[in-house]
Amino acid sequence: MIKDNAPELLDVQGLTATVDSREILRGIDLNVRAGEVHAIMGPNGSGKSTFAKVLAGHPAYQVTGGMVRFDGADLLELSPEDRARGGVFLGFQYPVEVPGVTNGGFLRLAYNTVQAARGKEELDPLEFDDFIREKMQLLEMDPDFLERSLNAGFSGGEKKRNEILQMALLEPRLSILDETDSGLDIDALRIVANGVNQLHTSDDAIVLVTHYQRLLNYIEPDYVHVMENGRIIKTGDKRLALELEDRGYDWVAQEYRERAA
Amino acid sequence: MSTIETSAIETSAIESSAIESSTIESDFLGSLLTPAADAGEHHDAWLKARRASALERASALSVPTTRDEDWRFTDLSSLYRLQLKPAQAVGQVDSAVLKTLMFPEATTRLVFVDGHFNTAATSIVNDDKVRVGSLRQALRDDTWRSARSAIESHLATIASVSDDVFTAANTAFLQDAAIVHVAGGAQLVDAPIQVINVATGHEMRSNPRLLIIAGKGSHCTVIEDYVAVGGSAYLTNSVCEIVIAPDAEVRHVKLQREADTAFHIANTTVLMQADSRYRNWSVGVGGRISRHNLNVVQNGTGIDCEMHGLAMISGRQLADTHSSVDHAFAHGGSRQVHKTIAGGSAHAVFNGKILVREGAQQTNSSQQSRNLLLSPRATVDTKPQLEIFADDVKCAHGATVGQMDADEVFYLKSRGLSEAAARNLLTYAFAKEVVEHIPVASVVSVLESHILEQTRNKEA
């Protein structure tokens, strides 16, 4: 929801970044305020996922210019863990499998680490068990998930549900969901989207990185941005997503080039 | 892990230094073959003969150097420079300390201190199907009469002395041994047996020995445990022989928790008969230099074995495992996973040979060597070797060597974990895969806490 007096959560200006000396982000500007849902769309290789990872602090990407402020602070100065503790959450496109670490144990460790950093109460295993089971119901997850190794052998849909479960636990103020819809069937998509919608309030913001309009039928964006070649070249409302579905991306790029010329 | 898939990876070789002289080695062999005071004690003639022939063989061999292919990464010259004395008597160990080393599930426990049987600390639950005790007891005590011919058939006949000077030296001075004799049909599924070898460790050498005889259709779990209560340099030169009769199953847990200053050289040789099963977990965390030779011989059809190895080392430790599985008959199976975790300047070595002989059709064998390097100074040398002479077999092998995967670390950090917490968790998970299926719960929990502690303290 767009509110005129909502506080600014994320302010990105002229952000450039490289990986292996290749420039992927070429000057991104984005402003996100509390309560808003933004969708970032664009063709493969346009830099959407890179942008998401740079915001979370992935070490493979070097920020070469521009600035990012999160809740008033310089986000780029912070380590990935401090960003997480401060309220930035990245839902991974490909969540990492970690055999040997139980999902339940990991979730409690992550939760308590973040709670401690925020000066909030940590939970012992019994208390956490009650707490996590309630959150799992939101995503229609079987309690068996807690006993399994973290993401190991999970189906695509199970991994994405587990990502949103982590979002539910860590109570972020800014959630960046990187292609959370990929690899999901219709039922899983509905469950995951429903979870996200229930977690979203007027105090936090969501940035959805997605290829397809499909997800946006379930999670309604306030803004739709089109990325190409490392820049946001067009911004509209949810109708833009429908138009992209209809006409593809080429016309947006065409229009951008004409404007630039 | 970020990994390189390959069948044979050999990184930096350590060449033996030029100053190493053959005099040091022959002096060491001489001292290794110096008998302990009680070596003249009376034994049965068959045992005397086996000892004598082992001594003869040992005297004809020389101690290995890095010029030997099988030892090219494991330089024992620092061992050869030590003046080691044979452990003469049972060392003193505080009973409270001993108690902390015992696994509660193991109601039957044999305690050896510096290679000598400690009757006081031993606790044995024997019945007419199961005999557990020392070789000396077995040879003189009437209750052992039914087991005696099996002991005579197998002791010092399974582990070959022909080209292994350490096994030959152990056999040459075989005075006592831990004996586990499980009669046909005996089921000891929930009653593991712990054989504790304690080193009090002061410039000493000991020759622990274990013989496990599993009768037809029997089932047992044995924990072969090496621990230290002292700190200075010493040598444990151990031999474990296991013979498994048809349809029997032996679950064997070898724990090497020696002092970081110790030299641990161990030979495990397993002789398997038709339709038997052998499950091995070998975990090594101690030792300045440790070497484990694990040899499994499948001497019948329908045999299945599993080997799970873990070496977790740091500082300047070296851990070397050489294993071999000999598939000689049809329908055999073997599964092996060997993992190493090397921090600091540690060096892990793995050489795993799978031999599938001409008659061993329908063999199903897999071997994985997985190695995690925690520091840029740590090294690993791994060499899986497959030799297949049968044409209808399924064999898979592979080796990976890697640093911790940056994406995995980032994933955990993105959930708020610190760099150190993320790395420790991933190291723990890598190790845990090996230990979590050990069939004795208290062993699993002791090892898991050890792994956690090690990841926290010894990453440097």
Image (spheres, rainbow, N blue to C red):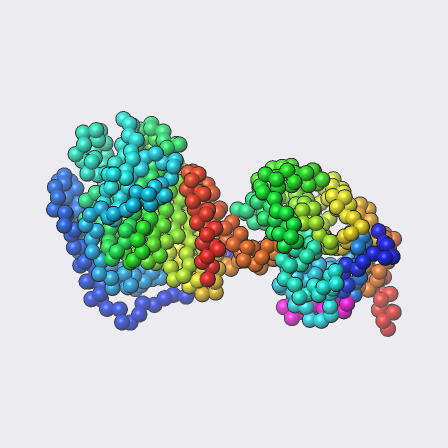
On the picture, is A222 further left or further right than B183? right
In this rendering, the answer to whether B219 lies above or below B166 is: above
**Does the magenta segment cover residue B7?**
no
> Which residue corresponds to the image point at 57% horizontal and 45% vertical from the top-left?
A105
Q: Where's residue B450, x and y in %?
A: 43, 49
At horizontal 34% and vertical 52% (from top left) the residue drawn is B258
Q: Main secondary structure of the magenta part?
A: strand
Left or right of B321: which side holds A200?
right
Inspect this view and state whether residue A26 appears.
no
Residue B166 pos. (x, y %): 25, 53
Q: Nearer the viewer, residue A57 or B398?
A: A57
Picture coordinates of residue B230, whole percent (x, y)? 30, 53
Query: Residue at the spot x=63%, y=68% of the render?
Result: A20
**Quadrant housing the C terminus of chain A:** bottom right
Return the x and y of residue A259 as percentages of the image width and height: 87, 69
Which residue ends up furthest to the bottom in the rendered image? A261
Total numbered badges shown on the rendered structure: 0
Residue B247, image quadrant: top left
Q: Which of the 4 image quarters holds residue B151? A: top left
For residue A210, side relative to residue B347 (left or right): right
Residue A70 visible in the displayed image: yes
Front residue of B216/B312: it is B312
Q: Nearer the viewer, residue A154 or B452?
A: B452
Residue lying at 63% horizontally and 54% vertically, measured from the top left: A117
In the rendered image, the vertical position of residue B144 relative to residue B363, given as above or below: above
Q: Which residues are magenta?
A: A13-22
